[in-house]
Amino acid sequence: MDIILDGLKQAFLLVARLDAEVLSVSFLTLQVTLTATAISMVLGVAAGTAVALNEFPGRSLVVGLVNTGMGVPPVVVGLFTTILLWRNGLLGELELLYTPSAIVIAQVLIATPMVTGITLSSIQQIPKSFRLQVLALGASRLQMLWYLYREARLPLLAAVMAGFGSVVSEVGAAIMVGGNIRGHTRVLTTATVMETSRGNFDMAIALGVILMVIAFSVNYALSHLQQRSRQR
Amino acid sequence: MSAGAILRAERLRVRNERKFRIEIESLEVAEGETLGIIGPNGAGKTTLLLALAGLKKPESGRIFFRGEPLDVSGSMIDYRLRVSMVFQEPLLLNATVFDNVAMGLRIRKMKGAELNARVAEYCELFGIGGLLRRRAKTLSGGEAQRVSLARAMAVRPDILLLDEPFSSLDLPTRESLLADFEEILAKTRSTALLATHDRAEAIRLSRRLAVMSGGRLVRTGTPAEVMNDPSDEFVASFVGVETLLEARVEEANETGFFARAGSARIEVAGKAAAGEEVILGIRPENVILSAGEGPGATSMRNSFRGRITGAVNLGAHYRVKLDCGFPLVAYVTPRSWSDLGLAEGSEVTASFKATAVHLVRRSSPDA
């Protein structure tokens, strides 16, 4: 119990003191996860919509892959991203391994199937006749998509929350492709793992609390948006 | 091929999702008319409407809008902005009534005072002016379908396509909406295509009917033409076998009226105003035939001399077609047929009660 209380105290002090290291780790975490979430949202919503609205051979296979992708262990994604970015790997020339960009890439690979899957199911739930009705009122294809997203706005925001939640809390891939390099690729999760393994529980708890506050704040903001749009 | 046709389809072949193909040799809609497309479920009515709405690409054939052929290979956006379609389900946005009725107008970039005024105008027209701020989810089925109709008509389409718009409503709701819609169609002078499996609804709203079966149009004409001269057994069984007469009310009193149909003057129990154009329906089982000059002393108010122009033995009875100065169909049992010595060409007297004649359309609830 004392360890936790000390940890909370320590966390409070670190934040109150505006500890440079804690701030930079927190800032990088936000930057990386929000970038990854934004990219996954664009890719996932586009892919989910494309699969939901089109009939093509092998469609059920694609749907199965997307659903499997939603549950792929981040460690496996980390492994493949590492191999991909390795010096003599497919994208080795970009020299991205052990950079924040590498973490973003891994996180995009983790979150995109999530966003794709939820988008797919939420768009599919809207009956086809609704799409015909929108077109029958003279809508262009873009206008039709706008109305479709408008109808699916609650599950689409849930997709963003799920995507963000999956990457902000992720540690395995971030360590493998980022390397937890101090001042460069150290994020809250990897720092927490390191401090815990060193026995610095107070620091680890402090980082954990900050991580939870960030996760809560972003999700609270999104939920607020979601619940407000429910009334509209 | 009349010059006034706003919409014309030629040799149209369209396939739906279930690989069912409709084939329309030719179809014309005149400006300002309502064409009723009737047929059982699965006849291909929806597929035809979707093709005419520019929402389903035909395999082959051509569609002309105001004489100009449509390029059906593109998005048909220009054409789609000129027509609008209402479906069986209201398919409303999860938004307010205002936002729903404004939808088609916003798609056309209308905004501000013009938008507000147009939405208000069409909501008033459909009796939902008081519901503007209500969420679509909280509406009753009838209210929701009114919103859907107002939404489609608010864009003032050149052609309104209606796919079973009243079919999912319960009877009283449907009756009140039908009565209002009939008035609105007349008032706005809209051109409309109404697909329905309900012939009474089609007769009431349409000047012309097209009967659809197995993906084809099997008969086109005025309600009376289609009903009285069905081209084949299918049409006959689908539209019902009663006689329908286009008539004009000559004289009306407290209990009934006299209507002129061809050379005949028919007495009807019911309400209609003098000068009104009506359609009268007479079921064949209510027509009594007698060989002599008159029916004798009976309570039947209508009695006409006529000649048998055709008869079909249906087993339980003969369906007998008569010419009494107007076409009339009667049922006669095989026994009476032989007892009375009837044959094609026989002179008979056909009689029916004033109460056996029903008004089929125009603000008549007993349709």
Image (tube, coloured by chain):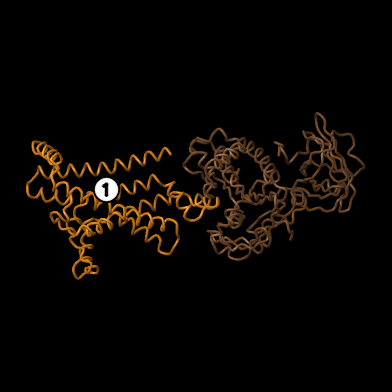
Chain colours: A orange, B brown
Marked residue chain, label 1: A
Q: Quadrant of residue A92?
A: bottom left
Query: In the orientation shown, which residue stands out farthest toward the top?
Result: B254
On screen, residue B347 above or below B258: below
Identified at 63% across, 58% down, the residue is B214
Is residue A217 toward the left or the right of residue B188 in the image? left
On screen, residue A82 above or below B284: below
Q: Quadrant of residue B57?
A: bottom right
Query: In the orientation shown, which residue stands out farthest toward the right?
Result: B293
Identified at 73% across, 40% down, the residue is B362
Q: Nearer the viewer, residue B237 or A188?
A: A188
- The quarter of the image holding the N terminus of chain B is bottom right
Which element type, helix, strand or loop, lies under badge 1? helix
Where does residue A154 sit, x and y in percent of width and height? Answer: 38, 44
Give the crowd class for mark 1: few <14, some 14-19, many >=20 residues within 10 Å: some
**Hey, what amino acid is under mark 1?**
Gly
Where does residue A41 sit, x and y in percent of width and height? Answer: 34, 53
Is residue A4 toward the left or the right of residue B93 in the image? left
The residue singled out by tag 1 in the image is A165
Identified at 61% across, 63% down, the residue is B13
Q: Nearer the viewer, residue B241 or A75?
A: A75
Is residue B50 toward the left or the right of residue B204 in the image? left
Is residue A39 toward the left or the right of residue B244 in the image? left
- The quarter of the image holding the C terminus of chain B is top right
Where does residue A180 sit, x and y in percent of width and height? Answer: 14, 55
